[in-house]
Image (cartoon, rainbow, N blue to C red):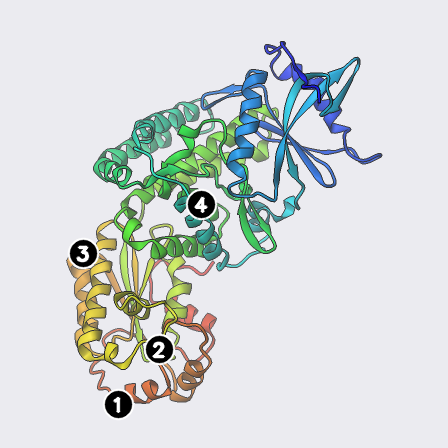
Amino acid sequence: MKTPAASTDEASGEAGQAAVLSFLAGSGEPNAPAQRIDTHCSIVFLGPSRVLKIKRAVKLPYLDFSTLEKRRRACEDEIAINRRHAPSIYRGVVPITRRGDGFAIGGTGQVVEWAVEMARFDERKTLDHLAAQDAFGPELGESLAGVLLKSHRAMSGSDGSHWLASLPLIIDRNTGQFLAEPDLSRESIDRLHELSHQSRARNIELLRSRAAAGQVRHCHGDAHLGNIVLLDDEPVLFDAIEFDPVIATTDVLYDLAFPVMDMLYFGRKATANRLFNSYVQTDWDTQSDALSLLPLFLSMRAAIRANVLFTKRRQRQHDHTIGTQASRYFELACRLIEPEPSRLLAIGGKSGTGKSVLARDMAHLIEPRPGALVLRSDVMRKQLYHAAECARLPPETYTSEASDRVYQAMLDRARRVLAQGLSVILDAAFLTQAERGAARAVARTAKVAFTGLFLTADRTIRLQRVASRQRDASDATADVVLFQDSIDTGNIDWQIVDASGSPATTLQCSASHLPDASLD
């Protein structure tokens, strides 16, 4: 097969792409021109079953697609990188050729452009569209955490030198672009700039130790919700950064921060919290000592998204809708770099009162973002005895000495998390005054606000709930429920919450005991 000849005209910029773009717009089926979607660095043509993606002939501060050869390499890199995440979507690189007065997709004429060929999927299934319609539940966060963890673990660590050197440059570049936006407050820009640099400097040793430990890896790099699609009800990453592997080689928590931040932007706080909790809890030993990086990482991601949209607005003749979105991301960046004070919430009660459901459902209501980290005694016990979460443990792991060990481990983790500026929810029975006092003491030592909730429910309800459990970390049985009724709980100086009703009712009653907790 004859190899297409490459064009030598590489200086025409976006204007030189106009004829090719016009051809591709009509490349759909008869009487059904391809749908065109413009981004800040690409132009996408959606056909009935095929998608062609062209790189814009642009040179931006963070990418250079200004020549045909650079666009070819970017297309090839995009295929290689994204097949790791979405092999069913990414087909290959195809040339757009010219012979005589016409163009062809493929063919043997002179190559005038390169395109990434993809399988068509329902673009209404990208998470940004679904989030705007409130079309998924918090459990999606757990699925997405698994996808991100798998992608991060598949890559080897980098020495992190480029990543560490890039951080102040990213902050400065964001600031420079914000200063060009007349509608943004100069005071807010300056404060975001100052606090971002302060956070980086304060955490520099942690950042270095993370790099040395192999936590700087070639990640997706651009995992906002518009680059995640639901295929067969599972989240799939696509459109990873291909134009510069250095930009995509970051701390894995910085990669996690993008979808967490975007969930917050779209008001999907519960999903953001589940994503955060599931990722950190699954990889606790590696990630739990780096949580102080989250305000910086989340804020930087919001700032980057704001600047991408400001660039897109300029390309679209100052589209006011895009400008409003960009400003909202900027405001989010400013809020995230100044997190609210952390707090400790302890939820106690006998088996079957619904502690774990309440802890899960309350976590996203608690500042600072992305909400509280949930520490559950049932899960802690399984981890201490190296058992699977839903495996049943023998009776000797439930002696008073064993339980003391579980509580101590849980409280130790709480101290570590609180010291990093995040909030914690403790989910355990707390049936004795000593256990409840120990939880309060953790908050006192950490100098954070404390709230204790103690759930109650009739024995019949508790028995029914315990009997109906499936694949749960708790080993409680009907015998445990009956035994707990014989325990002297002493004076309970926590807020008593009747949890006999639905989870929603219990959540509403419990939230009333937390200042600033809103169910909106």
**Position of residue 213 measured from the top left corner of the image (x, y, whole percent):** 26, 41
Give the amino acid at mark 4. Ser
Kindly identify the residue that appears in the image at 42 percent across and 26 percent down: 178
- Residue 240 falls left or right of residue 202: right
- Of labels 1 and 3, earlier in sequence is 3
- Residue 370 falls left or right of residue 491: right
Front disc: 1 or 4: 4
The local secondary structure at tag 1 comes to loop
Spatial CA distance of label 3 from label 4 is 35 Å
Front disc: 3 or 4: 4
Quadrant hosting residue 119? top right
Spatial CA distance of label 1 from label 3 is 34 Å
**Position of residue 371 measured from the top left corner of the image (x, y, whole percent):** 36, 54
Question: Mark 3 sits on what residue?
Answer: 446
Question: Mark 2 sits on what residue?
Answer: 475
Front disc: 1 or 3: 1
Question: Mark 1 sits on what residue?
Answer: 486
* Viewer-side residue, 209 vs 256: 209
Give the amino acid at mark 3. Ala
- Of labels 1 and 4, earlier in sequence is 4
Kindly identify the residue that appears in the image at 60 percent across and 30 percent down: 319
Spatial CA distance of label 1 from label 2 is 19 Å
Quadrant hosting residue 111? top right
Kindly identify the residue that appears in the image at 33 percent across and 63 percent down: 514
